[in-house]
Amino acid sequence: MNLEPSLAVRRPAFPLLLGVHNQVLLVLVVIALAAVASSGFVGDAPNRLVSGRPISLWSAADPITKAGVALLGAALSATCFVRPSKSLHCTVVVLAAALLLLVLAAAGQAASHLTQSGRLAARISLGPAFWVLATCAALALADALQRLNAGLIAQLFAVIGIAAGAVLLAASGIFDALSLTQEFATHRQAFSDAITRHMALVGASVALATAIGFPLGVAAAKRPGLQNPVFAVLNILQTIPSIALFGLLIWPLSALVAGVPRLAQFGVGGIGVAPAIIALVLYSLLPVVRNTSVGLAGVDSAVIEAGRGMGMGAGQIFRQIELPLALPVLLAGLRIVIVQAIGLAVVAALIGAGGLGTFVFEGLGQYAVDLVLLGALPAIFLALLADFTLQIITTMVSRRLAR
Amino acid sequence: MIEIEDVTKFYGDRRVVDCLSLTVPAGDFCVLLGSSGCGKSTTLKMINRLIAADAGTIRIAGEDIATIPAEALRRRIGYAIQSIGLFPHWTVEDNIAAVPRLLKWPRARRDDRVTELLEMFRLSPEIYRRKYPHQLSGGEQQRVGVARALAADPELLLMDEPFGAVDPLTRDDLQTELARIHRATKKTIVFVTHDIEEALRLAMQIAVMQDGRIAQLGAPLDILQHPASDFVADFVGRQGIGLKLLSVRRVADRMRPGETAEGEPLSLDTSLRDALSAMTTRRTDRLPVCDTTGRRVGAIALGDLVR
């Protein structure tokens, strides 16, 4: 006589999806399936200028890969119907990671298969089905990690594992036939220059924005009267479209250099690095100032009163109490600013600042999607990397300050 | 000893503290009692200069506090508040040692002092010194808050509704604890509360405050028996006055020395109110009394309570 277990079974959210325990995963599987069935996994173009003929996963990949993808997909959809448990989520993590790597390998392998026919100018590009499939696998992985309530270490291991797998695949040369890889190979030197320049732009502007914005944020927190004017100006700056701001800076800076020609020696000019950094700094100020002032204002006033009551000086209270307690919010601001600057710096290529945007605009001009991707993908990965790193730092700091 | 002389504080046009004078002798436990907005907290905060007085003088041990730098003054005075204000990013040990660190005590002396205070508050040092505030219960946090106020062995302790935010049971424990610590340390304490029961239980003298002035100053019994005005009578509560009277008298006052009785003994400093409660729950009209060492020294009967 054991009636309790039947009560413990979780009721499905929708009666229609009877027995489905993981709706998110099921939706991802359905989306991936639809994409694979309806669109090209790779595109096959005779040269760089014409758009490719879509080739489905089914006709592009070899039988073993096809079987692997099908098997992993079936296994993942099966897990949606199993009662959730720790071991189930671990299984999903492994399955999704394997699927992600297998999809990458399948694309490379399909490309080398299609180029074997010896057409030298042929370009095999990545198709919609590839992107959707890879994204769904990555989302399934992230979702499973979240359901596992995985700690930072576990997340770090998952990310490192996937990255190591991708690097190993790349080292084996499996991607060499893909047009994206060919584009990279022809631009290898320019690529490393661009990525260095990109990071330098972001680093310099974030450092400057912090140096200006932090004191401003402190001032805004200490003198509420300052908040309205400061935030009004910063909010307006934030609403100017980035391309417009880059353009708007050309005239005053050119005029400045015309007036003080010596400045030109230091790289100041209407176009180039100087206006790019100025614009990036202007955009970065709002998050820095806002998070600094919100973080400091959020420190419990009782704690500050206790500090004063014990005879701490204003400087001691700021350094020992307010700053450490506001730090998680300050770091969150830094995270926003860095991710935002990595994206905005792409646009800075328009005014000759260099960086990854160079490839994007060059690619747009030539209607060469792979060249656009060569600039966009690293920018995305840089942003994700910065986001993840700062998230780890923020969590570690917050944990030490756990309230 | 604290001498407050003709102290006035304005908030805008409003006199929150109005020409108030009060002397608290060394070793006294003085409770400022009143409803919110009566100026009791403001008065307290003027003693450690968290709020500057607009007129009048305050002297501590004969020294005018206006002549002492505010931070140096505050390091000499313990301060505990309702919201406790423990530093959430510091361990219990660091919190308690905050003022000693400001006073640049050597490490070993700080550690010893933390151990001593944790033991005084019956918090095992090995377990508690490395904990963070969020790992403590409300009552434990408040104990640490008071321990922190006592850390540098201040001559004077200011407490601003320190037990206002804890549940009644814990508050009861904390009051007992504070009374014990006051007896043991002989600190001068100024304690702000709006809770008449708390005031009756802890105070040696109560200053009932109304509109920034002292409506009546006196011993708890005095204030219950001879309220100086209708306001004071209303505030201490006409209802249940008998029970309040019982709560300010101790078993020691009414005990029959040498006599004996059956059952678990009451201690000498149990209030008569608690004695009545004990007799009611145990369905008896007579209970034995013991001293602090646990030796039986006499008995008390139901009739003695109303004598």
Image: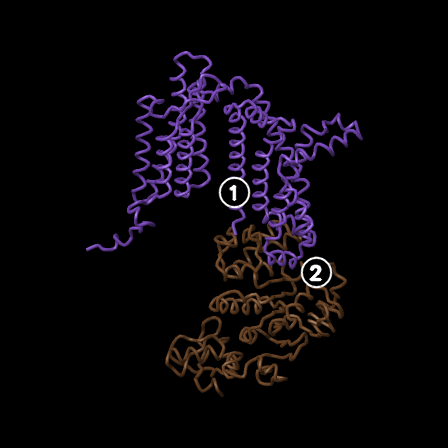
Q: Secondary structure at mark 2?
A: helix
Q: Amino acid at mark 2?
A: Leu
Q: Position of residue B254 (x, y in %)?
A: 50, 83
Chain letter behind tag 2? B
Residue at the location (49% across, 56% down)? B136
Q: Secondary structure at mark 1?
A: helix
Residue at the location (68% across, 63% down)? B48
Q: Which mark is residue A71?
A: none
Question: Do tags 2 and 1 sit on the same chain?
Answer: no
Chain letter behind tag 1? A
Q: Position of residue A173 (x, y in %)?
A: 43, 18
- Give the camera-side residue of A325 and B97: A325
Q: Quadrant of the N terminus of chain A?
A: bottom left
- The chain assigned the colour purple in the figure is A
Mark 1 lies on residue: A396
Q: Amino acid at mark 1?
A: Met
Sort mark 1 into few (<14), some (14-19) or many (20+) by Cα contacts within 10 Å: some
- The chain assigned the colour brown in the figure is B
